[in-house]
Image: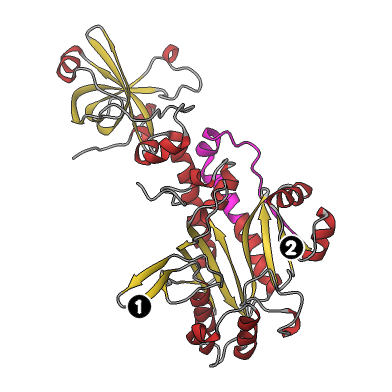
Amino acid sequence: MLRTHTCGELRGKDADKKVILAGWVETHRIQGKLSFILLKDSSGIVQIFVNPEITKQLGEIARESIVQVEGIVKKRPDNQVKKGMETGEIEVSATKAVLINKAEPLPIDISFDTTTNFDKRLDYRFVDFHRPRIQAVFKIQNEIAKSFREYFYNQGFIEMQSPCVISAASEGGTELFPVQYFEKKAYLAQSPQLYKQMLACSFEKTVTITPVWRAEKHNTPRHINEIRQMDIEAAFYDQMSVMKELENVVNRIVKNVLANCKKELELLGIKDLKVPGGVYISYEDTVKKIKGTMGEDLTPEQEKKLCSMYPDAVVFVHSWPTKIKPFYIMPKDEDPKAEYSEGFDALYGGTEISSGGQRIHLPELLIERLKVKGLNPNDFKSYIDSFRFGAPPHSGWSIGLERITQVICKLDNVKEATMFPRDRDRLMP
């Protein structure tokens, strides 16, 4: 048996209990014939007291080496337990200790305030994961994904798995990664959009968390080229009702992060996270508020300005111009030449976290909109045909998992919220 307990679960009530622990060496401090090991695992950290015999047997142990310890839990004297002390009220007196795997000198600094530059940390991401601060980010991200799934499971949504290799653009444009698929040319999916619509027209409500790829040659703190998207699609929902679902799920996500990730939020220094409400503003009114230009997308600076007007809220900018939105977004009044659409963007924490809206469920209208966007309807034949056999009105949206993690954790760069980032230059590790 490698271990009977984890480091973080031991308490004063466990005094005199025999335990087997296994984890990483945070520090190994030798004092004469005695030594002390701070042993950590994903649950926490505990001090190990090592007697002269075992100290001599082990020798000096490098940081991050893997050690197994058998010993007796001891309650530390009150005068040794300092308030806020990481190792707490107990220590373990080792009766046996085994060096399982010796760590080589670390290629990067993994201290809390690391001095290693960001790119090098990403080169050694598997070592960077040893930092408690990085672990905190991904524990919060795990809570975000879990809360998202649970919310929609409870709403009766069916989880789908869409294909990641497709024959044509999902959303138009040329920002696609081509792949050779046997004798055919194919692409990495830029969205599950077309497939989730097909499911909504049968199952009514579908949800997914899936990787997507965007081939834009950008290099900003908000963008990566491989993304995890959290998507929903629902029949008999219009633009307003599907926005309400987004407000509700972000509300639930933040509530759960506050309730279940207290330690992680404290580690990241986040003290002002609040459960957000929702604010709904039309595109036209938004442009007036921020003194923008009609017919143009919002700049990052304008997004920040709008969010600053409504702190602690998800801001929904709805009814966007059709020329800015994808071909599948429903134009107002089902008019193929309408100036405005049933599409929206959602902004939170100073940045866009989602876009979506009501989709076109009428085949002939869809063909017209494809032509307006300069796309060939023949490339979307199976998609168009899926609406010829009883397709209801339906709506949906997507949230970037890394993007909302960046917002909640107040990170400077979305790559900090990505386990193994893929950008224009990075394919490793």
Residue wearing tag 2: 296
Q: Quadrant of the N terminus?
A: top left
- Give the magenta range: 252-280
Q: Residue placed at 73% from the left, 85% from the top?
A: 335
- Secondary element at image label 1: strand
Q: Amino acid at mark 1?
A: Lys
Q: On the picture, is 212 further left or further right than 350?
A: left
Residue 282 part of the magenta segment: no
Farthest residue in the top direction? 32
Coloring applied to the structure? secondary structure
Label 2: how many Cα within 10 Å (few below 14, some 14–19, many 20+): few
Residue 393 in sight in this render:
no
Q: Amino acid at mark 2?
A: Glu
> How many numbered marks are there?
2
Mark 2 and mark 1 in contact (Cβ < 8 Å)? no
Q: Pick whichever, 121 or 173, lies toward us.
A: 173
Q: On the picture, is 301 further left or further right than 285?
A: left
Measured from the top left, where is residue 352 in percent x and y? 64, 55
Residue 280 in sight in this render:
yes
Q: Residue placed at 44% from the left, 65% from the top?
A: 177
Q: Pick whichever, 379 or 328, lies toward us.
A: 379
342 relative to 305, above or below: below
Residue wearing tag 1: 184
Measured from the top left, where is residue 202 in percent x and y? 51, 84
Q: Residue placed at 66% from the left, 49% from the top?
A: 275
Q: Residue placed at 39% from the left, 14% from the top?
A: 77
Q: On the picture, is 282 further left or further right than 196?
A: right
Measured from the top left, where is residue 359 in percent x and y? 62, 78
